[in-house]
Amino acid sequence: MVERNETTALDAILKAASDPTRRTILTLLAQEGPLRVTDIHARFDMSLNSVSKHIKVLEAAGLVKRRTEWREHLIEVQMTPLSAVDEWFASLRSIWALRLEALDHIMTKGAAKDD
């Protein structure tokens, strides 16, 4: 059984990753490493305020971390929270594997009767 705080974290991660702009920001950070907010903003045709709001959603989900160096705010991707998504998908895969095994058993048993 999944605990409440794990479900809440997974919900926040999936909600944050549901937006194409935020997925693009995550991909950009994963590929290029930490970037300044203004560098991220330069890649999008939207206001700095809008980009900042997207980054805040990612921060709230734990998918990025902000670090300040002098006057610069660097944003870096945090891969660890994605393990919650991996675990959830793994549980779905195991459920489907069991169902497919049961179906295979039924089909094999039915084919054996026909012989």
Image: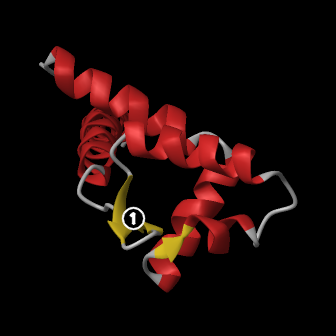
Q: Is residue 106 at least partly visible in the picture? A: no
91 lies left or right of 114: left
* Circle 1 residue: 77
Q: Work out which residue is located at the far right of the displayed protein and give it.
A: 45
Q: Is residue 48 at least partly visible in the picture? A: yes
- Return the x and y of residue 68 as percentages of the image width and height: 36, 65
Q: Would you place residue 52 above or below residue 109 in this image?
A: below
Q: Quadrant of residue 69?
A: bottom left
Q: Residue at x 37, y 73 (%)?
A: 70
Q: Nearer the viewer, residue 5 or 41?
A: 41
The number of callouts visible is 1
Q: Would you place residue 81 above or below residue 25 in this image?
A: above
Which quadrant does the N terminus fall into?
top left
Q: Would you place residue 9 above or below residue 40 in this image?
A: above
- Return the x and y of residue 19 as percentages of the image width and height: 66, 42
Q: Residue at x 33, y 45 (%)?
A: 62
